[in-house]
Image (cartoon, rainbow, N blue to C red):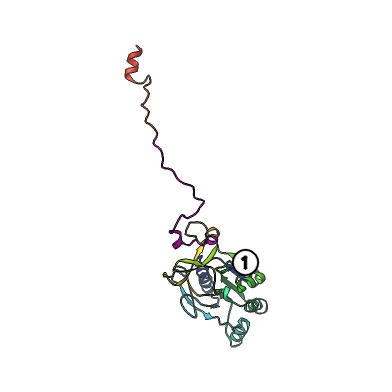
Amino acid sequence: MPELVFFSGTMDCGKSTLALQIEHNRSARGLQGMIFTRDDRAGAGKLSSRLGLVAEAVEVAEDLNFQQHLVRHLTAGGRTDYVIVDEAQFLAPEQVEQLARVVDDLGIDVYAFGIATDFRTRLFPGSQRLMELADRLETLQVEALCWCGARATHNARTVGGRMVVEGAQVVVGDVGEPSGQVGYEVLCRRHHRRRLTAASAGAGALSPDVLPVDEPTTAPKVPPRRGLSDPLRRAESH
């Protein structure tokens, strides 16, 4: 049975890489897919991963109707066995409903990839609708890490390395942007609540809960005791 599957995770956890892997696996078996994306780091009409892989894609405009687009393609003699949608958090709820109709009415598998929450820890409307309609929800198992080494669960927006909590929900950027530009960083919940990014962590103690560490004390040296195995003690015992 065709499915609508939503793969979610934080930024930098391999969503686009998995999307490209699914495309590779299916095309290698003779299946033909259609890839959609929006605001990819590589530019319009591209699906790219941080590993350097790139595939051609259809850029999703705000007025794109997925079902109508695919019906026109099929009516013109085209073939589509599956659909991949990257950056699905940017979709409008109505577009997610169109993807559900692609599965139910056209019998085509749809694999959507995106982050669930924004930099304020609020669900993206597109992600929320996907969670409501998807046949299957998959959380990516490749964990992104916070700068402290803990599992990263939240996306932080940064300006000059400092976390910001106000602004438009959608501002295009990426992890590791140069200082002074809008960028993003993945953090654990603890450091997201404290607004403590990797750059700001060097400004003071990493946590007020850190216990002081005393210098180790040197134990006094105790002269070795001579036992019966000592030649002098054996001589004295006779």
- Can you give x and y, in whole percent of width and height, for residue 123 in the image? 61, 69
Front one among 144 and 121: 121
Asked which quadrant contains residue 115, the reply is: bottom right
Picture mark count: 1
> Which residue is labeled 1 in the image?
137
Asked which secondary structure carries label 1, the reply is strand
Could you tell me if residue 3 is visible in this image?
A: no
- For label 1, count other residues whose C-alpha is less than 10 Å away and answer few (under 14), some (14-19) or many (20+): some
- Image vertical order of residue 68 relative to residue 187, above or below: below
Residue at (44%, 62%) from the top-left corner?
199
- Say what amino acid the circle numbered 1 marks: Leu
In the image, taking residue 109 as reference, residue 45 lies left or right, namely left
Q: Position of residue 17 (x, y in %)?
A: 50, 69
Of the 4 image quadrants, the one containing the C terminus is top left
Image quarter where the N terminus lies is bottom right
Main SS category, magenta section: loop
Horizontal side of 74 relative to 186 (left or right) equals right
Report whether residue 219 is seen. Answer: yes
* In-front residue for pair 209/9: 209
Range of magenta residues: 191-218
* Quarter of the rendering containing residue 113: bottom right
Compared with residue 238, is residue 4 higher up or lower down, i.e. above or below? below
